[in-house]
Amino acid sequence: MIKDNYNTIEESHFEELREKASKFLAFAYSVYNQNDVQGKLEALKHAHPKANHYCYAYLLGVNGEEYRANDDGEPSGTAGNPIMGQIKSHGLTNVLVVVVRYFGGTKLGASGLIAAYKDSTNLVLSNCKIIEKYIHESYKFTFTFENMGNVMNELKHLNFDIVEKNFDHTPNVIAHIRTSIASDLIKKLKSRLLNISLDRISEETVIEGLIIEKLQ
């Protein structure tokens, strides 16, 4: 089955951790592309111009296909990787965590830094609301006025997520369907409209007065 679901955070969140006078400000964001990531980083640097480090990690995509961990001047492997490890440990994607550090005058050493970045990230993510999201495909259903009632009734019966309606000159609706069930759901729609068994339906089955288009 096609993987079309993932866990992410519902909204941004902030937590603070102190370790030997250093402050670790952990910010968690829901992000979906590189522009989102850069925008959040720039905003934090503007809000905290006197901070010593802006360490971060992010995962993007259903399977975390895009990712990066950045130590931002901390010893290699002591900041970005611990942050990334916690994002993965919480089973999340489309998430950016930035830990802004204000140096307190006492060096923590490599192990101390790793623990501080790990713990601050765990703290902020543990206090985020986790939600499940789905990848969907968009389909346009164009029909005649004569069969509009039947089509709309079946779309409703099968719980199609209709996001747009147009009943002016050429009636049509646009619906979102989870990627993993799109093909099967459309076959069920055809089966009900034609009143024939599902095993007789294929992707090529045509219904008079109804055009089904997958939108890009």
Image (cartoon, rainbow, N blue to C red):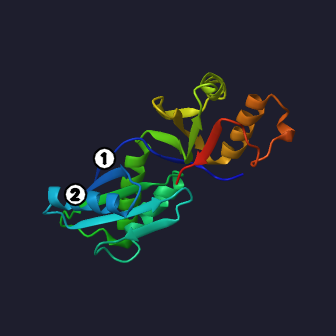
| Tag 2: amino acid | Leu
Q: Residue at x 38, y 77 (%)?
A: 76
Helix, strand or loop status at disc 2: helix
The amino acid beneath tag 1 is Glu
Q: Is residue 72 above or below residue 9?
A: below
The answer to which quarter of the image holds residue 113 is bottom left
| Circle 2/circle 1 CB separation < 8 Å | no
Q: Look at the image and tell me whether residue 164 can be seen.
A: yes
In the rendered image, residue 37, in percent from the top left (x then y), is placed at: 33, 60
Q: Residue beneath label 2, please?
A: 44
**Image position of 149 with respect to 79: above or below:** above
Q: Residue 15 got which mark?
A: 1
Residue 128 vs residue 177: left or right?
A: left
Q: Nearer the viewer, mark 2 or mark 1?
A: 2
Side of 169 relative to 134 (left or right): left
Extreme residue toward the bottom, this view: 76
Precedes in sequence: disc 2 or disc 1 = 1
- Extreme-left residue of the structure: 50
Residue 185, quarter of picture: top right
